[in-house]
Amino acid sequence: QLVVLDHELRVVLWSEGMAKATSSFTPAHGTGVEGLPFPSVSARRTAISALESVMGERSAEGEAALHPTLALQAAVTTAPNVSLHLVTPLHIGVRDEVLLSMTAVKMKPLSTAASSQGFENEPCHLLIMGLESFDPGLASLWRE
């Protein structure tokens, strides 16, 4: 599962893997993370807080964000730091819940990553990769 959010936490990319995990739910491009189908206000707050925390971090090297290729590598090799507990909206047909353990990494937008000029102050994106799905009944045991 793969999601890319812009600097304002709006959906830039929602992969086929995410659509499959969420019973074919696919948010429109530009949908804010607060518009995703969380089962509760608490689940929404927890996810947004974790994503905002990652967005505010600076890497150990002091870079604001990684090149997309390095961000993908980091997402694969870094421990999960975000959980997304989502429900399938009723208009999809079936109300399923999914709890995803994911890794969020700051990434340079593709449009600026191709340039060799310095874009350290440019808004970055978040690359979020799902590593594991859990039984949604375990959501209360998840600790950020």
Image (cartoon, grey):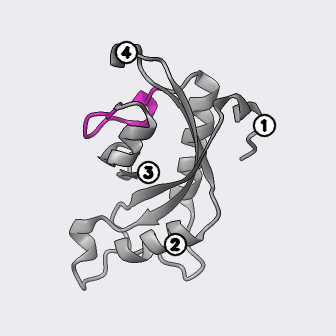
Q: Which residue is drawn at 43% across and 30% down?
A: 36
Quickly name the residue at label 2. 74
Marks 3/1: CA distance?
Answer: 22 Å
N-term-proximal mark, 4 vs 2 = 2
Quickly name the residue at label 4. 93
Q: Residues within 10 Å of mark 3 (few under 14, many from 20)?
A: some
- CB of mark 3 within 8 Å of CB of mark 1? no
Q: How crowded is mark 2: few (under 14 residues within 10 Å), some or many (20 or more)?
A: some
Q: Where is residue 139 in the image (x, y as percent from the top left)?
A: 69, 33
The three-letter code of the residue at mark 2 reads Ala
Quickly name the residue at label 3. 1
Q: What stretch is highlighted in magenta?
A: 25-37
Marks 4/3: CA distance?
Answer: 22 Å
Q: Residues within 10 Å of mark 1 (few under 14, many from 20)?
A: few
The three-letter code of the residue at mark 1 reads Leu
- CB of mark 3 within 8 Å of CB of mark 2? no
* Foreground: disc 3 or disc 1: 3
Answer whether residue 14 is magenta in the image. no
Marks 1/2: CA distance?
Answer: 26 Å
Q: Is 119 on the left or on the right of 59, as rendered?
A: left
The three-letter code of the residue at mark 4 reads Gly
Marks 1/4: CA distance?
Answer: 28 Å
Q: How many marks?
A: 4
**86 is higher (above) or lower (below) than 113:** above
Circle 3 sits in a helix, a strand or a loop, which is it? loop
Q: Residue at x 64, y 27 (%)?
A: 42
Circle 4 sits in a helix, a strand or a loop, which is it? loop
User: Which is nearer the eye, 93 or 54?
Assistant: 93
